[in-house]
Amino acid sequence: MSKKNKHPQKPQAGKPELTAPSGPLISKRGKITIGIGVLVVAVGFYVLSLTDPAGQNWASHLCPFMILGGYAIIGIGIILPDPEPVVENQPLPKQS
């Protein structure tokens, strides 16, 4: 039997290596936002169960906005970064 790859490939000098991100993929603030979005979607589906067959009551008009708004909040939560840490200015020591 012979080798299938007779000529080993040399690493190309111009291509950078792909690496996985070192930090978490979704920030803590993003996870909280996603949770709020899931809650809004769940309440939207509950309000959907209160609609009348003709679609003329308040629930019929409100639930589409709640469901789509909840999905939009989830999408925002996925890309929302953590806030930058606040560094307080330290007073300079008095010179004598």
Image (spheres, helix red, strand yellow):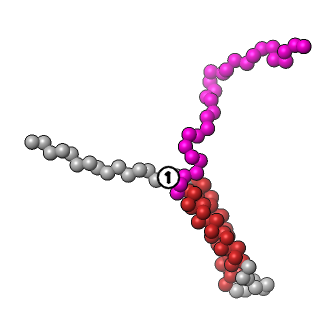
Q: In the rendered view, would you say 45 is above or below 73?
A: below
Q: Quadrant of residue 6?
A: top right
Name the residue type under label 1.
Asp
Q: Quadrant of residue 56?
A: bottom right
Task: Pick whichever, 28 or 5, lies toward us.
Answer: 28
Residue drawn at x 70%, y 73% is 45
Q: In the rendered view, would you say 48 is above or below 13?
A: below
74 left or right, relative to 93: right
Magenta span of residues: 1-29
Helix, strand or loop at mark 1: loop
Q: In the rendered view, would you say 50 is above or below 70?
A: below
Residue drawn at x 29%, y 49% is 89
Q: Quadrant of residue 70?
A: bottom right
Residue 95's x, y, as percent? 13, 42
Task: Pick whichever, 65 or 4, lies toward us.
Answer: 4
Q: Is residue 73 visible?
A: no
Residue drawn at x 84%, y 15% is 3
Q: Which residue is mark 1?
A: 82
Task: Pick whichever, 17 or 28, lies toward us.
Answer: 28
